[in-house]
């Protein structure tokens, strides 16, 4: 498996991966990534402004998942880990940790903290974020657009320059 920056040709494949994951965990509804306008063109969303990026996991030309970093609610200090989804066959292989490390290395060059929102129904994801140093929050940060999320995390980024 290979991790690389998103390309325009990845848009439809990564949208399909994300939508299938959201359906799997009951996230195919308003107030979640499901309804984000950016879903159809993640390449443009993550490349239209500074301090944003999205990475694809692929194997033999097949998109298996991805994740992104972007400022949270316009903040210059706090970013958000966004749209981190992998097909079920890749879960438990270690690639998610590599993908997260790639995203956090980028984030640490631009931000002081990394925030994320998810669903309690994504139990393995919640355990994964805890294992990788994210601290659970009791409520979302102000400015969240995903009102249907019910689990929130924060992580300090120590390599901020």
Image: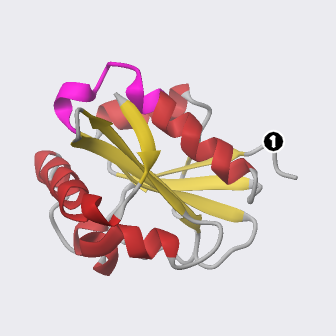
Residue at image x 31%, y 20%?
92
Question: Was residue 96 drawn as part of the magenta stretch in this picture?
Answer: yes
Specify whether 157 is left or right of 21. Answer: right
Percent of width and height locating residue 57: 35, 40
* Residue segment shown in magenta: 87-97
Residue in the image at 53% along x and 60% along y: 53
Q: Which of 113 and 40 is in front in this view?
A: 40
Tell me the colour scheme of the image: secondary structure
Give the residue displayed 13% in from the left and 51% down from the top.
Answer: 20
| Secondary structure type for disc 1 | loop
User: Measured along the vertical axis of the image, is residue 115 above or below residue 86?
Assistant: below
Residue 50 visible within the image: yes
Looking at the image, which residue is at 25% across and 27% down? 90
- The answer to whether 20 appears left or right of 139 in the picture is left
Estimate the x, y position of residue 3 in percent, counting from the top left.
Answer: 43, 38
Image x and y of residue 116, in percent:
50, 54
Compared to 52, does 13 lie above or below? Answer: above
Is residue 147 toward the left or the right of residue 47 in the image?
left
Name the outermost residue toward the right. Answer: 161
In the rendered image, residue 42 lying in the magenta stretch gets the answer: no
The quadrant holding residue 95 is: top left
Quadrant the N terminus occupies: top left
Q: Which residue ends up furthest to the top in the rendered image?
A: 93
Residue 2 in which image quadrant:
top left
Say which of 21 and 67 sits in front: 67
Number of residues whose C-alpha sits closer than 10 Å to that of mark 1, classed few (under 14), some (14–19) or many (20 or more): few
Q: Name the residue under label 1.
A: 158
Rendering coords of residue 19 (x, y %)? 16, 57
State whether residue 22 is above or below residue 50.
above
């Amino acid at each position: 498996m290979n991790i690389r920056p998103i390309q325009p040709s990845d848009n439809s494949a990564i949208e399909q991966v994300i939508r299938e994951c959201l359906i799997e965990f009951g996230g195919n509804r308003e107030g979640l990534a499901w309804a984000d306008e950016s879903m159809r063109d993640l390449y443009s969303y993550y490349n239209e402004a500074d301090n944003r990026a999205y990475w694809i996991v692929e194997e033999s030309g097949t998109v298996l998942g991805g994740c992104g970093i972007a400022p949270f609610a316009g903040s210059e200090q706090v970013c958000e880990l966004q749209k981190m989804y992998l097909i079920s066959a890749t879960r438990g292989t270690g690639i998610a940790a590599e993908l997260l490390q790639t995203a956090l290395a980028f984030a640490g060059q631009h931000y002081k903290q990394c925030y994320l929102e998810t669903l309690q129904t994504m139990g393995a994801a919640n355990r994964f974020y805890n294992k990788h140093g994210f601290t659970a929050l009791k409520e979302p940060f102000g400015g969240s657009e995903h009102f249907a999320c019910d689990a929130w995390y924060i992580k300090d980024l120590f390599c901020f320059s």
